[in-house]
Image (cartoon, grey):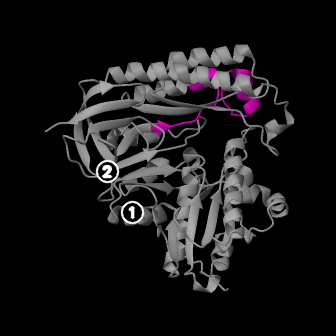
Amino acid sequence: MRTKSLKKNKINVVTLGCSKNVYDSEVLMGQLKASGKDVVHEEEGNIVVINTCGFINNAKEESVNTILEFMQKKEAGDVDKVFVTGCLSERYKPDLEKEIPNVDQYFGTTELPGLLKALGADYRHELIGERLTTTPKNYAYLKIAEGCDRPCSFCAIPLMRGKHKSTPIEDLVIEAEKLAANGVKELILIAQDLTYYGLDLYKKRNLAELLEALVKIEGIEWIRLHYAFPTGFPMDVLDVMNREPKVCNYLDIPLQHISDSILKSMRRGTTKAKTTKLIEEFRKAVPNMTIRTTLIVGYPGETEEDFQTLKEWVQEMRFERLGCFTYSHEENTHAYNLEDDVPEDVKQERANEIMDIQSQISWELNQEKIGQEFKVIIDRKEGNYFVGRTEFDSPDVDNEVLIDATSTYLKTGEFVTVKVIEAEDFDLYAEVVK
């Protein structure tokens, strides 16, 4: 029986990994829709495109498991075709073709035209900013550059994403205007490294000028900065942050470690003294700034002394937001030549210790917010609560503000002023100020 011909071709795009992948999936979906294709995100479809992550072990495992899951569905006749794209495919294409050969085709991170062709669609250059957003309607990611020129020893991103390449300011403004016209109120600027923005196009670090252009867009109320690098940070960005109310007093700057010997081995181009001074300068320039950072524990050669240095520094710096990862030994990176000598259980213990310290810091900082008023954007309703965020919080990774939905009616995507009435480690409870 020919069942396939009875099925309508619906393309299901499945996204794994970081916000950069979310953005790439949205661009893919926008192109497919422009070619008249029926496309959905993580729903039922007889043609599946899996946008994979290949960054660290856990992410790679999730990507492989997802591919295998859809291969079972293909064998059972529930889906007709499976295509794989993204970072895992870019990095391990020959291995994947050998290990999972019945995937219809594998594509790398720069092969969007080829993927579209395989899906029966044309790549259209004129579609600047045409995306099908998959985030809640009030915020969207804006990828301002692709790739990375940094030499960090532990990182495989340059292998998968190539050299840094900035998107011109005028193209980003067009994209942001289209997002605003569709109801987006918050732009989250992403790149492998925001601080490099413009060096290739304008021969200078041009993030501040980009922000000056984006704040003029009607309908955009918040602009948030993600993924800055600590060396060569363009300090004029802080002037814009202070001057322009639309630019959130928020910066995501992954610092990775603080022990000088580990920073040197990581090839981060900085020291404990320089990093500490930079954070102090940030806080002096923008006293109300929330700084989010991420750290890696268990890097090759990390001694107990290195870890104690890191712990003490986390306690001393009192970051508003902090995440911690265990080191993943990635082939073809510079650090892969080193012995992965910290046992997995020790890595995990160290990560837990850092997060215990951060949990206490976050609780103390949140207690200070009780009685204060904040402007909050409402992201969703969950159970008996409307869930929102302040300008000091990014979606999915930071604190949330919970407002009792049994006594207050709010709309998703609206801004409200709230007063904090209770606070936990990572959540605030608030009531709307009438």
Q: Which residue is mark 2?
A: 221
Dot 1 amino acid type: Leu
| Rendered view: 126 above or below 107 | below
Q: Secondary structure at mark 2?
A: loop
Q: Residue at x 36, y 24 (%)?
A: 366
Image quadrant occupied by the N terminus = bottom right
- Other-residue count near label 2 (Cα within 10 Å), few / some / many at <14 / 14–19 / ≥20: some
Q: In this view of the protein, which residue sits in the foreground, 431 or 236? A: 431
Percent position of residue 152, x then y: 71, 39
Image quadrant occupied by the C terminus = top left
Q: Quadrant of residue 293?
A: top right
Answer whether residue 198 is visible to the viewer in this image: no
Q: Residue at x 63, y 67 (%)?
A: 49
Percent position of residue 219, x then y: 29, 58
Going from N to C along the chain, the mark reached first, 2 or 1, is: 1
Q: Quadrant of residue 295?
A: top right
| Rendered view: 258 above or below 30 | above
Answer whether residue 44 is visible to the viewer in this image: yes
Horizontal side of 298 relative to 360 (left or right) equals right
Q: Which mark is residue 122?
A: none
Q: Are marks 2 and 1 in contact (CB under 8 Å)?
A: no
Q: In this view of the protein, which residue sits in the foreground, 274 or 428? A: 428
Percent position of residue 256, x then y: 63, 31
Percent position of residue 52, x then y: 66, 56
Q: Residue at x 57, y 79 (%)?
A: 9
Dot 2 amino acid type: Glu
Q: Which mark is residue 179?
A: 1
Q: Secondary structure at mark 1?
A: helix
The magenta span reads 251-275
On whether residue 168 falls in the magenta region, the answer is no
On whether residue 269 falls in the magenta region, the answer is yes
| Rendered view: 229 above or below 40 | above
